[in-house]
Image: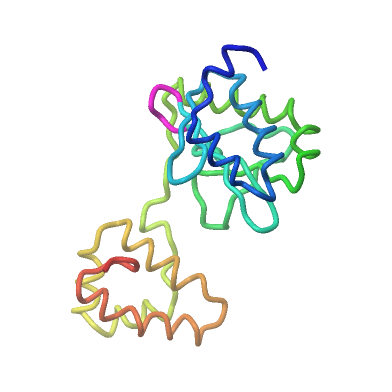
Amino acid sequence: MNQTTKNRKNPKVDTFIDKAGKWQKAYKALREIALDTTLSEDLKWGKPCYSLDGSNVFLMHGFKDFCALLFMKGALLKDPKGILVAQTENTQAARQIRFTSVGEVESLAPEIKACINRAIEVEKAGLTVEFKKTEDFSVPGEFQRKLDEDPELKAAFEALTPGRQRGYLLHFGGAKQSKTRASRVEKCIPRILGGLGLHDR
């Protein structure tokens, strides 16, 4: 590690890695790759985060079965090796590179660095992910029937912000069985009529 890299280390991230447990070695290896760029290091949302001129480019996070780099605009990155994955089928912008060992980090180091550089170029170019509009999301039949039957519910739903509308549509549509979708709709109707989003208190 050169002196410049050492000086750019954020003490908050030192503490995070010291307490990391299972993924400590992988985090250390990923950090070395991250700090060999022009990005700034910080701790945001409790995770090591790397940014360019205040704009978040990617962060490191860990789960039970893997740790990962999460690229905020990963959907815009070229991925010749096919290593970027969406967290869920409904994730629009972010993409992960997942690792189950420090060995995987080391073997993928050149491609990780290339991916980070591509992400930096995307940020420098000011590119943005074009998010799907609410009308582009399908409305589950169980909810559409309720909207058709109840003008008050329809008006209340349409009065919600686009983000709140999408939250409900994804929640309803995420259930595989019609019975579960119908149950979710019934439970959420009072919240919708009250002008609340799915997670509002």
- Residue at 69% of width from left, 50% of height from top? 22
Quadrant in the picture for the N terminus: top right
Q: Is residue 107 above or below residue 181?
A: above
- Residue at 43% of width from left, 34% of height from top? 128
Whether 82 is among the magenta residues is no
- Residue at 64% of width from left, 13% of height from top? 2
Left or right of 80 in this view: 58? left
Q: Main secondary structure of the magenta part?
A: strand
Quadrant in the picture for the C terminus: bottom left
Where does the image place residue 97, in percent across and percent down from the top left?
Answer: 66, 42
Where does the image place residue 39, in percent across and percent down from the top left?
Answer: 51, 22
In the image shown, does 42 or 127 lie closer to the viewer? 42
Q: Which of the colour schemes (rainbow, by chain, secondary structure, one colour) is used?
A: rainbow
Q: Quadrant of residue 176?
A: bottom right
Magenta segment, which residues? Answer: 52-56
The residue at the far top in this view is 3
Whether 54 is among the magenta residues is yes
Where does the image place residue 161, in percent across and percent down from the top left?
Answer: 25, 58
Where does the image place residue 95, in percent across and percent down from the top left?
Answer: 58, 43
- Residue at 24% of width from left, 83% of height from top? 150
